[in-house]
Image (cartoon, coloured by chain):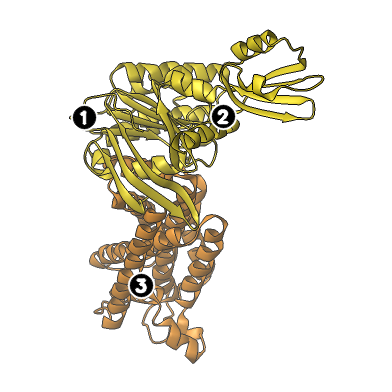
Chain colours: A orange, B yellow
Amino acid sequence: MNSLIKLEITRALRNRKFLFFSVIYPAGLFLLIAGGADSHTKIDGTGLTLPTYMMVSMASFGALTAVLMGNSERIAKERESGWVRQLRLTTLPGRGYVLAKTASAAVVSLPSIVVVFLVAAAVKDVRLDAWQWCALSGAIWAGSLVFAALGVALGYLASGDAVRPITMIIYFGLSMLGGLWMPTTTFPQWLQDVAKWLPTHAYASLGRAIEQSQTPHTQDIAVLVVSFVVFAGGAAWLYRKDTLKA
Amino acid sequence: MTTTAAPATTTPVVGFDQVTKTYGSVRAVDGLSLRLYPGETVALLGPNGAGKSTTLDLLLGLKPADGGTVSLFGTTPREAIVAGRVGAMLQSGGLMDGVTVAELVKLACSLHPRPYPVADVLARAGIAQIADRKVDKLSGGQAQRVRFALATAGDSDLIILDEPTTGMDVSARQAFWATMREQADQGRTVLFATHYLEEADAIADRVLVLHRGRLLADGTAAEIKAKAGARRVAFDLEGEIDQSALRGLPFLTSLDVSGQTVRIQSSDADATVHALYGLGVYPRNLEVAGLGLEQAFVAITEAEEAKQS
């Protein structure tokens, strides 16, 4: 299984277009949104400056891009091409394929998180304690597993031409409504009530709680755990269904 | 119907027992029973839609059977695959893109419990010179060779090939079968699906004829060729046609007279035509043509049905 993981990672790092979108794009978007903002005024009710706030949003967005887009489209494509069938004729256990995909997505998502952090610290003077940097990286990286599972589920749910639009809708919907692009406080109240139950919202909240040196909200952790169970369970169910169909 | 090429005490490499697979209302595989024994080179011959690919999918455990049992080396297909006893090349087997040929073959070797050196696998499949090429940049024939390399990355006891020469030109085809024969000579059991009678004839020492999910015939290539190698003889006769004399022609399998035109099917056209002149008639517009495989299958089916009734 390690050899497949290694090869998947090699391939991901070779794919310049994909690397650009998941590593450079979030950092660029951060500069676009927070670049003109001043580094001292706090956003109401958070105690965080706009750059600090957006840093977590964009790091989460970058990780989301890497794991969701990477997994869903590749899996759908390789199911169609028959590569998944070919792998079933090897000693590789069934879950090995999904694990390799997730591992390679995680390898790309880590730099996308770190690059946003570096840009935020260097250009917008975001300053945090050492433990906060470490905890932030860890939390955002680990949290991306939730969306990696969603990516796998989508890859087995949709096929061929349908997978890209479906993934795009879910990706943009989750990013926007979850408040990764702008604070949800700008939304009308009813939308805010919906947004706070989205896994992306909980994901970014987790990071912000670390920035505020607060204990993460129980609700956010619960939303992430439940999402992970639902997505991973769905992925496992769809995978088994696909296996029977071959 | 099954011929046993080895003593019954040997564990069959492949065991199908009353296997059935249905898609909607279509019976792709219909009560198929067969056994393959170590060292045999077997062709699974049949026209498109005969159930060849489905049979191979069932055999490899890629699809579950609706009824009956499938075993490989006395175990389940999955267990046999995990033990590295089976190498397979499927028609629908895709390749991972974005990697080189060598990287992909290396992956296949590392997944096999008893791998061969990567360089040997590349050389044997004839893809050493394209080892650094990206998999997505290959021609159809080259991709087939890469699939073959994946199927032969390690020391497997059974090699399964589904229409392996699709997309290859004549010389590539010949080179491919030469490689395949080497595999068989090393004592491996080889099972390949094809719709070319000539391929089955040249390579296999046992031929299974599949038609509509059923086993129509099982024998040596020569036996099958005798059955399927029927020819059609057509000619015109003047005057009154003596049907009973025509019916007495040697090797005749069917006779059809319409107007002045006579159509005959014969399992040995040379002998039949020779005897035809012996009848003292003067056939005109004489045509002798081989039957297509499709018609040959129909001929075999009719022969089987006639035997049963």
Nearest to the observer: residue B59 or residue A7: B59
Nearest to the eye among marks 2 and 3: give it: 2
Nearest to the observer: residue B102 or residue A122: B102
Reading the chain from its start, which is encountered first: label 2 or label 1?
1
Q: Disc 1 on helix, strand or loop?
A: loop
Cα distance in 3D space between marks 2 and 3: 67 Å
Q: Disc 3 on helix, strand or loop?
A: helix
Nearest to the eye among marks 1 and 3: give it: 1
Residue to which mark 3 is pinned: A203
Question: In which quadrant of the rendered view does residue B190 lie?
Answer: top left
Read off the chain for label 1: B
Quarter of the image with the N terminus of chain A in it: top left
Residue for point 74% across, 12% down = B281
Q: Pointers 2 and 1 in contact (CB under 8 A)?
A: no
Residue B8: which numbered mark, if any? 1
Amino acid at circle 1? Ala
Read off the chain for label 2: B
Residue B296: which numbered mark, if any? 2
| Mark 3 surroundings within 10 Å by alpha-carbon count, few (fewer than 14), some (14 through 19), many (20 or more) | many
Q: Position of residue B11 (x, y in %)?
A: 20, 32
Q: Position of residue B76 (x, y in %)?
A: 25, 44
